[in-house]
Image (tube, rainbow, N blue to C red):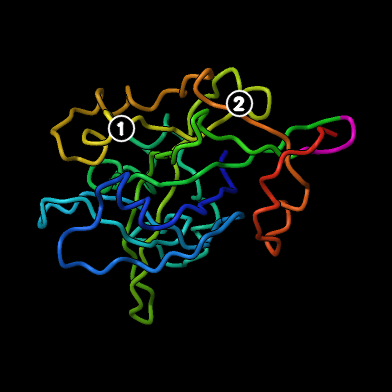
Amino acid sequence: MCGRARLSSDVSEIKLVFDSIPPGRPTPNIAPSWNVAPTDPLPIVHYDAKESARSLEVMRWGLIPYWAKDIKIGFSTINARAEEIESKPAFREAFQRRRCLVPVDNFYEWKKTANGKQPYAIALADRHLMALAGLWETWRSPAGERIRSFTIVTTTPNELCAELHNRMPVVLKPDAWPLWLGEQRAQVPQLKALLAPYPSEEMVCWPVSARVGNVKNNDPSLVEPIAAA
């Protein structure tokens, strides 16, 4: 699964990399975070057909289907298995109509060791921003509040991530973004083909402090390499 991430890059860099703010639209206020957790806000990139442009919008992590009766469902939908997004009720309509990219600098995973669990940071080898495959949704609470939320799609792990966990988030290369976002017409088999493990040789990982396990800790030291336990 993918349950913790970092996005500390400046919003200006996110805009530049993803070409995601239509003219005249205000830039979202995005605070840097070294320890993003489920229910936290994150900027996501989706295609706005009315504007014929990509849009950067802050949403809540943990997808709440439009038909949900309770916001708590979002705790169980932080990730969407690639094998299920076409059929699972919580995800199937969003997969058809509301796909997105989730920019992160790295994600975290925990490896079981003889001494407990050792957290690792996983990033692209060139340290560029990652684009995780996501789905998004709009939900209205019984009180009428509109909440937009997202989930991160996961797949089987590459060789690097398999040392840590049996799943990894889908990382999409830039040439796949137009297809996933819906800027180009695509059939389901084409979309499903994108949901493959990212090449191991283009990623790196390193052990980090166990402090990342506490959501109250949020500072640059969380991504500093340490000796593995």
Q: Magenta stretch: dominant SS?
A: strand
In the picture of the structure, the residue carrying the numbered disc 2 is: 161
Q: Foreground residue, 161 or 68?
A: 161
Pick whichever of labels 1 and 2 is earlier in the sequence: 2
**Label 1 SS:** helix
Q: Is residue 72 left or right of residue 226?
A: left
Residue depicted at 39% across the width and 41% down the height: 88
Residue type (three-letter) at the residue carrying disc 2:
Cys
Q: For label 2, count other residues whose C-alpha is less than 10 Å away and answer few (under 14), some (14-19) or many (20+).
A: many
| 12 displayed left or right of 46 | right
Q: Nearer the viewer, residue 59 or 127?
A: 127
Is residue 183 visible in the rendered image? The answer is yes
Image quarter of residue 141: bottom left
Number of numbered discs: 2
The residue type indicated by label 1 comes to Pro
Disc 1/disc 2 C-alpha distance (Å)? 21 Å
Q: Position of residue 4 (x, y in %)?
A: 59, 48
Label 1 Cα crowd, 10 Å radius (few <14 / some 14-19 / many 20+): few
Residue beneath label 1, please?
A: 174
SS for dot 2: helix
Q: Tell me, yes or no, if residue 37 can be seen here.
A: no
Q: Which is nearer the eye, 33 or 74?
A: 33
Which residue occupies the extreme bottom position in the image?
A: 143
139 in magenta: no
Question: Horizontal and vertical percent for residue 155?
Answer: 48, 29
